Amino acid sequence: MIDNIREACKTSCEILKECFDNFNFGTEIEIAEYLRKKAKEKNCKLAFPPLIVSGNNFLEIHHKSNETRLDKFIIVDFGVKYDNYCSDVTRMLYKGKPSRKDLELYQLILNLHETALREIKIGMNCFELDAMIRDGYGNDRKKFRHSLGHGVGKRIHQPPWISAKSKYNFKDNDVVTIEPGWYSKNKGVRIEDTVLLKGNKVEVLTNLSKELIVLD
């Protein structure tokens, strides 16, 4: 199982890197169609429809990519399957010149993401980790509109749920996502990795740069 998820994560990251390195898109749907095409070329099924968000669509957590023109922050959430096992990764692009406040927002979410990767451990309750990261938002707690993460396996969303209501304690060999986010109507940031808990280590399976990609 874990080797299959690891391979799915590797392929997802390869496709995203190719997308970012050869970026020439104007709308959400153009990115989504490119990712679909590349997954098909690699004989992979999608783990879920590519989720591309820009413009005024950020309050739709499971937004369906459409003809919205790319502007400022762009969420790219993508994953493929390998031998029926899923992967899940989200990276951020920015169309135009980021303002100081936008760069500070991105850095906040990146810091919270890295804190979660540093603090997650076997035996810890999912609620504890979710609460710890949520506290890092300060007055912006309500801008984080979903759980911190979820399990990944044959389904893209499965237990354990890293949420305020969870009573689950992390176990050895758990594969979960870590995905803090911040959303208003016309601005959104999410950084997501699929990770494996193994002994006292956390292995990030989606090994792709988390630097904000600023597009010309």
Image (cartoon, helix red, strand yellow):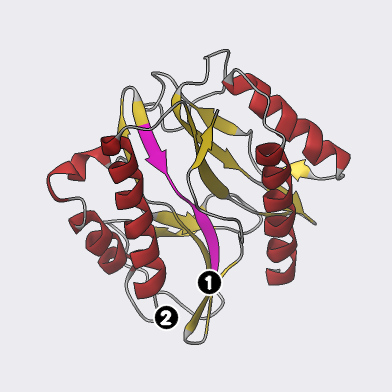
| Circle 1 residue | 174
- Tell which circle, 2 or 1, labels the residue nearer the N-terminal end: 2
- Magenta region: 188-195
Query: Whole-percent x and y of residue 69?
Result: 53, 15
Query: Eyeballing the image, is 126 above or below 27?
Result: below
Horizontal side of 90 relative to 124 (left or right) equals: right
- What x and y, as percent, mark residue 39? 78, 40
Query: Which residue is drawn at the image coordinates 52% and 20% (left, top)?
Result: 70
Please state, as top left, top right, bottom left or bottom right, where the N terminus lies in the image: bottom right
Q: Residue at x 27, y 59 (%)?
A: 133
Task: Specify the amino acid type for callout 1.
Answer: Asp
Residue 108 got which mark? none
- Quarter of the picture containing the C terminus is top right
Asked whether the residues under the numbered discs 2 and 1 touch, taking CB atoms below 8 Å apart as contact, a structural biologist would say: yes
Q: Circle 2 is placed at which residue position?
A: 122
Q: Reply above or below: 114 against 74.
A: below
Q: Quadrant of residue 198?
A: bottom right
Q: Position of residue 80 (x, y in %)?
A: 71, 47
Q: Residue at x 42, y 55 (%)?
A: 149
For marks 2 and 1, give the CA distance.
Answer: 9 Å
Q: What secondary structure is found at the residue carrying circle 1?
A: loop
